[in-house]
Amino acid sequence: MQPHSSKRKPYQRELPVDWWLKHAFYTKYMIREGTSIAITIYSCILAWGLLRLSQGEQAWQGWLEALQHPIAILFHVLALGLALYHTITWFDLAPKAADIWLKGKKLEDKVIVMAHYVGFALATIAALIIITY
């Protein structure tokens, strides 16, 4: 026995390619999600550096020289900007992800956001102390 199929076409709403450009919220969302591409490329560059480090001093020096090319410097500046954008927008979303209650009261959003910034600052300071010694 064969199930009955409808002769009507299912409704499919048209969605233009630029749908996300028509509303600021979606534009910011898509940009934040798009930053992952630059971060992935940057992670591959770092992995390439680790590979070169394992291959000896000459390979390591060659990798460092490649990073001094103007295109590499431009990419790193762009990647830094995109990473900072992603970080800031993610910290602003943190209260939605972290539903924290203390003594029966919901922790204020600004406290959660500030805790993220403080943690980010402390981690940055710790990393700078570690690499300078």
Image (spheres, helix red, strand yellow):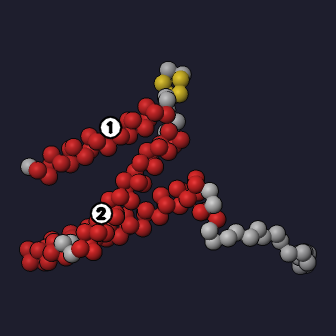
Residue 47 seen in render:
no
> Which residue occupies 14% across, 52% down?
131
Position of residue 7 in the picture relative to residue 90 (left or right): right
Mark 2 or mark 1: which is in front?
2
Residue 113 seen in render:
yes
Asked if 55 appears above or below 32 in the picture, the reply is: below
> Which residue occupies 39% across, 59% down?
82
User: Which amino acid lies under the numbered mark 2 shown in the image of this protein?
Assistant: Val
Position of residue 56 in the picture relative to residue 119 (left or right): left
Asked if 90 appears above or below 17 in the picture, the reply is: above
User: Which amino acid lies under the numbered mark 1 shown in the image of this protein?
Assistant: Val
- The image quarter containing residue 115 is top left
Q: Quadrant of the N terminus?
A: bottom right
Of pointers 2 and 1, the one earlier in the residue sequence? 2
Residue placed furthest toward the top = 103
Residue that numbered label 2 is attached to: 77
Residue 110 at x, y percent in the picture: 46, 33
Residue that numbered label 1 is attached to: 118
Position of residue 19 in the picture relative to residue 76 (left or right): right
- The image quarter containing residue 72 is bottom left
Residue 105 at x, y percent in the picture: 53, 23
Per the model, the C-alpha gap separating discs 2 and 1 is: 23 Å
Q: Secondary structure at mark 2?
A: helix
> Which residue occupies 83% across, 71% down?
10
Q: Secondary structure at mark 1?
A: helix
